[in-house]
Amino acid sequence: MKWHQGKKAWILFFILPVFNIYSQPQREEAAQQAIKNKPFEGSIYFVQETLTDTSYYTYYVKGRKVRLDIHSDCNNCEEFENRLLFDLDAGTITALQPRRKLYMNITVRPYISVPDNNYEINQTKNYKMILGYKCYQWRVKNKSQNTEIAYWVANDNFNFFHDFLKLWNRAEKHAVYYLKIPESDGYFPLLSEERSTLREKKMRLNVIRINKTELDKKMFEIPLDYHPYDR
């Protein structure tokens, strides 16, 4: 009996290290996969240029919450003129006015995709590196609107963006055209250029900085010293 117990102990002595050798890479692979699949969290700074104006914006993203800061310039992107809070699950948008410390709930119009056979979509394999991301060129053209937009998109689990565009529901072609692209979940355009079909420049959106970092959930809440606009 003692011999069998001793033999069993020796077998376990040799088996357990081998099991650990094989299980350790599996745990590491699972951890790496979890990190890879984690939705983007952090900040995205970008510039919008038209023929007459230049505007600066910052997205802050945490889970299903998005904050959009609007700046007069980006010498100091911590200062903002106006701020919008988006809750993608609740389907709400709240506007903040910092100078008067006011907030207002914005009426949300439901997004409706209008069928239009005039859109030509080309998700090409052309790519270039932007801010360390491999960005593919997707082009959307609508001849009846005399417009073509080229998006250079990266995939870093930017899972918020598709639903964000639907909730904000802007009439700008940059948003409308992008929502026509199939299988765009997880992608985000680091550069987009709107031109006429004769290649005349209309508008350009350009991401200038991306920071991946954990954000405080308080960043997405109405400050306690703000008051309702209609109070």
Image: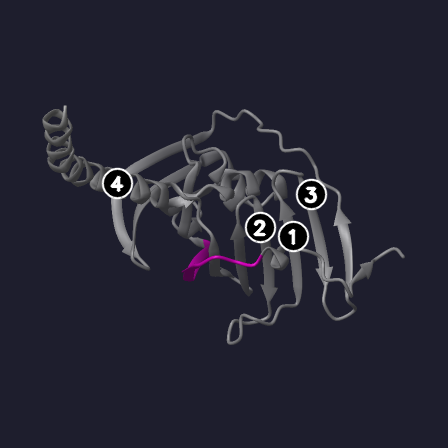
Q: Are marks 1 and 3 in contact (CB under 8 Å)?
A: yes
Main SS of residues in magenta = strand
Does 206 sit left or right of 76 as displayed? left
Foreground: disc 4 or disc 1: 4
Rendered image: mark on residue 66: 2
Foreground: disc 4 or disc 2: 4
- Asked if the stretch drawn in magenta spans residue 208, the answer is yes
Which sits in the foreground, 179 or 144? 179
Rendered image: mark on residue 85: 1
How many numbered marks does the figure carry? 4
Residue at horizontal 48 percent and vertical 59 percent from the top: 43
Q: Look at mark 4 in the image and give the residue it sits on.
A: 29
Q: Quadrant of residue 79?
A: bottom right
Q: Which residues are magenta?
A: 202-216
Q: Please rate how many residues cluster around mark 3, counting C-alpha atoms within 10 Å: few if below 14, some from 14 to 19, many from 20.
A: some
Q: CA distance from mark 4 to mark 1?
A: 36 Å
Q: Please rate how many residues cluster around mark 1, counting C-alpha atoms within 10 Å: few if below 14, some from 14 to 19, many from 20.
A: many
**Can you name the residue that lies furthest to the right here?**
231
**Can you name the residue that lies furthest to the front here?**
1
**Can you name the residue that lies furthest to the bottom here?**
75
Q: Quadrant of residue 29?
A: top left
Does 138 sit left or right of 85 as displayed? left
Amino acid type of the residue that numbered disc 2 sits on in the rendered structure: Val
If you read the primary sequence from the N terminus, does the residue marked by circle 4 or circle 1 appear first?
4
Percent position of residue 89, x then y? 62, 38
Q: Look at mark 3 in the image and give the residue it sits on.
A: 92
Asked if residue 46 can be seen in this view, the reply is yes
